[in-house]
Amino acid sequence: MLELSQLREVDVPPLDAGRLRSLIGQERYDRLVTAAQRTRAYLQGGTVWSVNSTAAGGGVAEMLRVLVGYARGLGLSARWLVMSAEAPFFSVTKRLHNRLHGAPGDDGPLGAAEALVYESVTAANAAAMSSQVRAGDVVLLHDPQTAGMVGPLKDAGVTVLWRCHIGSDTTNRWTEEAWGFLRPHLVGCDGFVFTRPAYVPGWVDGERVAIIPPSIDPFSPKNQDLPAASCRSILATLGVVDGPRGADARFTRRDGSEGAVTRRAAMVADGPLDADARLVVQVSRWDRLKDMPGVMTGFSDVVAGRSDAQLALVGPAVADVADDPEGGDVLRQCVDLWDGLPPSRRRRIRLITLPMDDIDENAAMVNALQRHASLVVQKSLAEGFGLTVAEAMWKSKAVVASAVGGIVDQVAPGTGVLLDDPTDLLAFGESLVTLLDHPEEVAQMGGNARRHVVDCFVGDEHLLRYSELIERVHKS
Ligand code: UDP
């Protein structure tokens, strides 16, 4: 049996929600503070626990760092645990992940043997956690990895919410199979959170559902303002662009102290890119559904011959994302594809993996890359939400992205380009060429994009909706 010490607690420094005020205005800020007071009163000293399966890499970890931080800053007892599991479990849960997106993934089974692996790991994690929680606590479980913890934690007397960050707008045999696997574990769950109404399975009681889109923190190292010179310095330090490493590869850490980017990125490339040429960037985990190979092919076939632009495909170092077993394969596929390109195309394209040893430093690297970009791309084949889109839009970037899942909610008219068919590489490439030819229009889209993010995807709204759900399910 696992001890709680094996469910790793992520140390999250409290964040001062007051800093949001300048951005969201007094009224929204006051609503947030009032909601936090109500939730504190409801919980009567209880803790809100968040549980997921990785401390780094991917949108869930990104958001937990922020939301747990703000909740703590608002005086709530909030803690974040990362479950303990190994490769066989993550093969099963990656299969579930792909299938909830409507894709077969590795084509493997989800039968009795997989259920056994899944249940033994989730039961052990729940048992380890049960001794630590108290009646009146709320446990917010994230994604398929944690669904098996619902029942045992309910038995421990806590309120259990399950949030699914993934989903598909339509159902097919793969989504049905994944939900068939998960459903028995979710019986009795007090509340559910989904990103979009279309993601809610028909059998979930609508009274217990909240629709909550993800959000970004404009002040985190991932999103904080960085002068152009710092971005260049950071990228030069990484080895991504040419130029002096300089002294200004700096950023502000989550705890308020000053940080510096010192590590280099691992790159598949012939040396650094030209710092003065325009850059197109996609930042993603190395996941099939993010379609990094499609981005490379579309860029190489359509864009490279018609503009001076360069492409950076950026993801985390694959060994550092514990719950994503496909990362190595996808990166290898990209490298093979890159190797097969004509040298004139290869010179314009880089595959970049960013070290994750220091999460704040990694975030600053992503920040600098997105800010340095002329255009940001998110050409996913399926997407729960796609936090990278909001991150880029906040940085006043026009985004060229697939019209799938939550991306559609982000790329509002006049803020970027939505691709109706993510597999249409010609249309994708043409969109990039058109935007690269119209920088003024792109700048205007960028301004609209930033405003849209402030209106819809900053953490105050996210926390408010959590607070409403907690109140609702505590009452029932
Ligand atoms: N990300 C990161 N470092 C990387 C690659 C990605 O911090 O090297 C972050 C990215 O900035 C975003 C998150 O991982 O915050 C990805 O979230 P998204 O919702 O786009 O996709 P997910 O990975 O959750 O499917």
Image: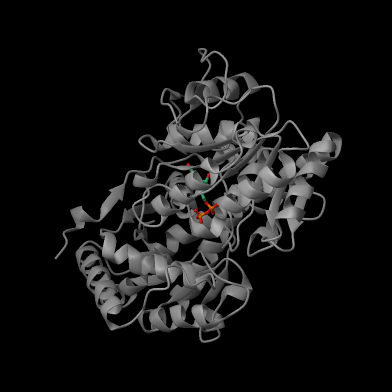
Q: How many marks?
A: 0
Depth check, front residue: 258 or 411:
411
Q: Quadrant of residue 368?
A: top right
Q: Residue furthest left?
A: 1
The residue at the point 53 percent across, 21 percent down is 236
Relative to residue 96, is residue 343 depicted above or below?
A: above
Depth check, front residue: 192 or 176:
176
The residue at the point 45 percent across, 35 percent down is 362
Using residue 454 as the reference point, say whether residue 14 is left or right of it: left
Percent x, y for residue 127?
20, 69
Percent x, y for residue 134?
26, 65
The residue at the point 48 percent across, 72 percent down is 104
Q: Quadrant of residue 307?
A: top right
Question: Residue 424, can we see it?
Answer: yes
Using residue 166 as the reference point, say whether residue 423 is left or right of it: right
The residue at the point 56 percent across, 50 percent down is 292
Percent x, y for residue 322?
33, 52
Depth check, front residue: 139 or 59:
59
Percent x, y for residue 13?
39, 40
Question: Residue 415, can we see it?
Answer: no
Quadrant in the picture for the N terminus: bottom left
Depth check, front residue: 287 or 406:
287
Relative to residue 290, is residue 197 depicted above or below?
A: below
Using residue 440 as the reference point, say whether residue 17 is left or right of it: left
Q: How is the image coloured?
A: one colour
